[in-house]
Amino acid sequence: MLKNSLNKFAKSVLLSSFLLGSHLLASEVTQIRNATVKINYGGKVFLVDPMFAVKDAYKGFEGTLNSHLNWPRVELPFSTDEILKDVDAVIITHTHEDHLDEVAIKELPKNILIFVQDEKDKNYLEKFGFTNIKIMKEDTFLGNVKLSITAGQHGSDEVMSYAKDVLGEVSGVIFQAKNEKTIYLAGDTVYNKYVEDVVERYSPDIIILNAGDAKLENGDSIIMGKEDVLKTHKIAPKSIIIASHMEAVNHASLTRGELKSFVKENGIEDFVLIPKDGESLEF
């Protein structure tokens, strides 16, 4: 009964061609490209990790898989004007270029409200003339929406032992509001105790995972892959998982097609949504 109900639910939420930025009664998550998502939640519109460059604008990240390939690997599905329409606040989980690039820095209004993870990122943005920056805490509010910063780790303990200076600090965020489903956007983290602790504490209904399995040149993963998606499902078996951060940077190793086959093989296709760029999910 539960599986059938969730199957109907999963099919009903997968929508195509929703207008960006429209204030709907339900929560809406729009996958834009890479880790850039737009979340219409609690009457507010949030833009997460904007990366606006045209296809192939940047050279591949040195020291990563397929560093010979330029990125972004695909074009934006919408114009930047459409993406920025009705945005109330921007959330920057960390300042790596594939989460905040030079084009976004140029095109974001300098007075737009931006939430960041720490003083270091705040200072970084202030250098570009942004004037309305707040550091997220566990009880940060915008209107009726409560934002709570969450911890993450941009690689395993082993990876961080030799690459911490490059990978740096990362974060995620919990979205909560009255009469809304709790959303957990995990950010650039691998599966670890931080993720387990967040799921245990907040019991999120919807979990957005950066699941493209980006790798360093030695093959070490620095964000989640398909096995991490399965692990997350096992600790949150009733949650709907949305796979983001896929097929857009040179070092992403997991395709949507591969993930789709994996979740089907493991019988979790009712719980894992894999939106295309430009696709919206309504809850």
Image: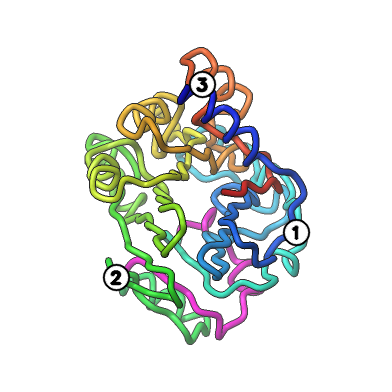
Q: Position of residue 261 (x, y in %)?
A: 58, 17
Q: Which amino acid does label 1 sit on?
A: Leu
Residue marked by disc 1:
19
Q: Is residue 98 magenta?
A: yes
Residue marked by disc 3:
263
Task: Please identify the dominant SS of the magenta region.
Answer: loop
Q: How crowded is mark 3: few (under 14 residues within 10 Å), some or many (20 or more)?
A: some
Residue visible at 48% across and 87% down? 131
Q: Position of residue 84 (x, y in %)?
A: 67, 69
Judge whether 48 appears above or below 256 on screen.
Answer: below
Q: How crowded is mark 2: few (under 14 residues within 10 Å), some or many (20 or more)?
A: few
> Could you tell me which secondary element the residue under label 2 belongs to?
loop
> Could you tell me which secondary element the residue under label 1 belongs to?
loop
Residue visible at 54% across and 53% down? 98
The range drawn in magenta is 96-118
Q: What residue type is labelled 3?
A: Val
Q: Where is residue 195 in the image (x, y as percent from the top left)?
A: 29, 42
Q: Quadrant of residue 158?
A: top left
Residue marked by disc 2:
139
